């Protein structure tokens, strides 16, 4: 069994190199990377990732973690083994950047020459053996069949499909809030059996929202008890956002839970109208 743990590093690790260039030292070689491409296979949902950073290793040494595009000096020369790990913003927070352990690493053997630049074109995909339990397509993309988010509790509105505001494909999920429909409270139709003990559980999603949105989980415990935990608040904005929501700690805090459901909450209080658009929602774990 693979054991995947999410390591979280604050942003001060970024944009630095482990080897400073001093005038008395040898001339460095340079590594240039503009982007890391990503491809999802059938059943893994969208290939639209948001890989912002490259964690660069040369001959096993961490050179640093750098926001792309970049060109960095490296005090190495000759035959070198370069490894690039894709990095993302965790929970949509710029100050929490991490290697995504569910993405494959890019390996390349190159020859570094002092004073010369080598440009790399890294690619990545999901690790083999990763599970995508949201539905039989691996994600809710609002393109086919019904909608796998149900309104519950005091919700006065629901998720519908829209073709007017689309992130990808031909449709997105839409939640409209107004004076007559002030509250949305919804949960995933399916309940998920998720690994505990600190093993990685991440939800990817695209969202565009002009009201505050809360994401959390219901944990179904033995004896019929249901635990409820708010996990993340998403601030309103004008643009689509890609989120990598780290549920690892929340899930592991319920060691006896049998299943989990994701929930979404929003309220239009203080505004005349609110609009929430969703796309490409998928949970992943080993």
Image (cartoon, rainbow, N blue to C red):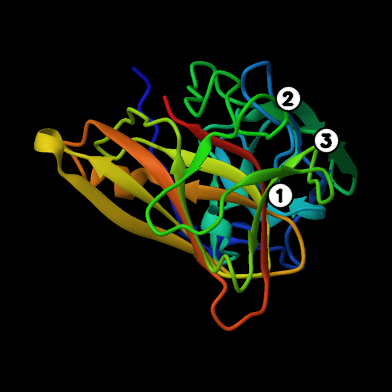
Residue at the spot 82% in from the left edge and 48% down from the top edge: 30
Q: Residue furthest left?
A: 223
**Which residue corresponds to mark 3?**
170
**Which residue corresponds to mark 1?**
75
Q: Residues within 10 Å of mark 3 (few under 14, many from 20)?
A: some
Q: Earlier in the sequence, mark 1 or mark 2?
A: 1
Give the CA separation, mark 2 to mark 3: 41 Å
Q: Position of residue 215 (x, y in %)?
A: 46, 56
Quadrant (top left, top right, bottom left, bottom right) of the C terminus: top left
Quadrant (top left, top right, bottom left, bottom right) of the N terminus: top left
Element type where label 1 sits in the image:
loop
Element type where label 3 sits in the image:
loop
Q: Residue furthest right?
A: 116
Question: 26 or 164: nearer the eye?
Answer: 164
Q: Position of residue 86 (x, y in %)?
A: 64, 41
Discs 3/1, front? 3
Q: Is residue 27 visible?
A: no
Q: Residues within 10 Å of mark 1 (few under 14, many from 20)?
A: some
Position of 193 compared to 118: left or right? left
Position of 155 compared to 210: left or right? left
Residue at the spot 49% in from the left edge and 31% down from the top edge: 284
Whether residue 217 is situated above or below residue 135 in the rendered picture: below
> Which labelled disc corresponds to residue 109?
2
């Amino acid at each position: 069994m693979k054991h995947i743990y999410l390591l979280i590093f604050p942003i001060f690790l970024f944009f630095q190199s482990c080897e400073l260039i001093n005038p008395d030292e040898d001339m460095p070689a340079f590594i240039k990377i503009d982007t890391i491409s990503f491809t999802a296979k059938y059943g893994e949902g969208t290939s639209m990732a948001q890989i912002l950073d490259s964690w660069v290793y040369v001959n096993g040494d961490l050179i640093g973690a750098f926001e792309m595009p970049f060109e960095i000096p490296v005090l190495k020369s000759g035959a070198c083994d370069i490894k690039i790990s894709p990095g993302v913003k965790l929970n949509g927070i710029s100050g929490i950047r991490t290697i995504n352990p569910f993405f494959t690493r890019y390996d390349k053997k190159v020859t570094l020459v002092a004073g010369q630049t080598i440009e790399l074109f890294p690619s990545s995909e999901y690790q083999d053996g990763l599970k995508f339990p949201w539905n039989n397509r691996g994600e809710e993309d609002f393109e086919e069949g019904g909608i796998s988010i149900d309104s519950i509790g005091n919700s006065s509105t629901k998720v519908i499909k829209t073709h007017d505001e689309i992130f990808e494909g031909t449709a997105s999920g839409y939640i409209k809030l107004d004076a007559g429909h002030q509250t949305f409270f919804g949960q995933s139709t399916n309940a998920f059996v998720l690994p505990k003990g600190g093993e990685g559980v991440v939800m990817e999603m695209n969202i565009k929202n002009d009201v505050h949105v809360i994401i959390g989980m219901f944990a179904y415990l033995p004896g019929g008890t249901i635990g409820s935990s708010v996990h993340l608040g998403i601030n309103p904005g004008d643009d689509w956002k890609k989120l990598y929501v780290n549920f690892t700690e929340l899930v592991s805090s319920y060691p006896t839970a049998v299943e989990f459901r994701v929930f979404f909450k929003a309220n239009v209080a203080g505004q005349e109208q609110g609009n929430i658009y969703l796309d490409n929602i998928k949970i992943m774990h080993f």
